[in-house]
Amino acid sequence: MKPLNKPANPNFSSGPCSKRPGYDLNNLDIDTLGRSHRSSVGKLALGRACTDTAEILGLPEGYRVGVVPASDTGAFEMIMWSVLGARPVDVFAWESFGSGWLTDATKQLKLDNLNSYTADYGQLPDMTQANPDNDTVFTWNGTTAGVKLPNADWISDERTGLTICDATSAVFAMEMPWEKLDVVTYSWQKVLGGEGGHGMLILSPRAVERLESYTPAWPLPKIFRLTKGGKLIEGIFRGETINTPSMLCVADYLDALDWVRSIGGLPAAIAKSNANLDVINGFVESRPWAHFLAQEAEQISNTSVCLTLDLEADQVKQIVKLLASEAVAFDIGAYRDAPAGLRIWCGATVEASDLDALLPWLDWAYSEVSA
């Protein structure tokens, strides 16, 4: 029978993700609206976006945080174009976005000394193939595959190359071994449920040293330039952005950071994502027709949870449509390049109670399309 209860919040999209519980536009501090981003109030807000991020994440001394254009993609492209080419490069890819970085490294930057290590959806490549003398490009959590790195044991503490990590669906939801990560990028619209269009760039002192000592062979567009006269443009990491940001989006991000503090900080945000995954895990364990796309338990993402079902691809699409038509779950179909299935966002802005309410509807929809 069709369930009676529905999730209070049916937004389970993997990006842009659900707004935080209790979110209200009227609660945003909008004193910056209509003001220049270079004004005192504008710089203060953007500076807070950098300093509050570093504080909540517990970044090591000397790590810098900057707001840059074009979401996580812009941040990652910026650093690839700025630092790659100085050393051989190892690229690890196991889903769509990692494959995109591999394509850019080979077809756009046309790096000659490049090694690629790939795996099918649901699996990880052999990360121990990383050469500590090479630069290493990888995602931490494969958003479109639901497969995450369980640890960073494969990264050498004696490395001479840089580790360059796309962590857009991991930051604020997973423990990040910052001392092993030289560059980390993410975007506001993932775990914090912020607005799109802006990227975050985190640099270690080793990454700054590379930027100041290496000039790539190719020209850099203005929005990619992180140095001037061989020195890091420090203002970028104090809120003096390269281009004009949306101050409304900045206010929204600061609201999300304040919310993380209010629930107990980073440990609480991580715990919420883990608890949400537990809800899905209990469902999968008791349903013979539902499976995690990730093949290894320790590699299952606690944010972009990807499931396969014992159904044909068209039947899975029917389930997605049924749930949306009932206003039970929006935007939970698998990514277009991934195997047919469901992708349910379980980041910290999602409430476990809404996942509990969703799961009986999955049973109902499965029965409807498989009858």
Image (cartoon, grey):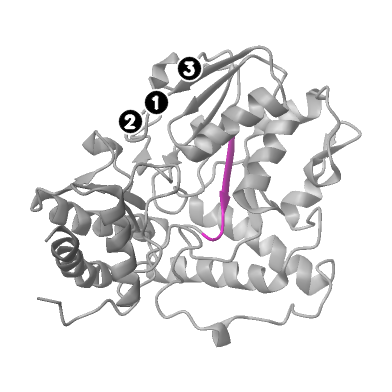
Q: Which mark is residue 119?
A: 1
| Disc 3 and disc 2 in contact, CB within 8 angstroms | no
Residue 39, picture quadrant? bottom right
Q: What's the residue at 21%, 56% (across, down)?
A: 280
Mark in the foreground, 1 or 3: 1
| Disc 1 and disc 2 in contact, CB within 8 angstroms | yes
**Residue marked by disc 3:** 130
Q: Which mark is residue 123?
A: 2
Name the amino acid type tagged 1. Answer: Ala
Q: CA distance from mark 1 to mark 2?
A: 6 Å
The tag earlier along the polypeptide, 1 or 3, is: 1
Name the amino acid type tagged 2. Answer: Gln
As helix, strand or loop, the secondary structure at mark 2 comes to loop
In the drawing, does residue 368 fall left or right of residue 31?
left
Q: Residue furthest bottom?
A: 26
Q: Quadrant of the C terminus?
A: bottom left
Q: What's the residue at 63%, 14% (across, down)?
A: 88
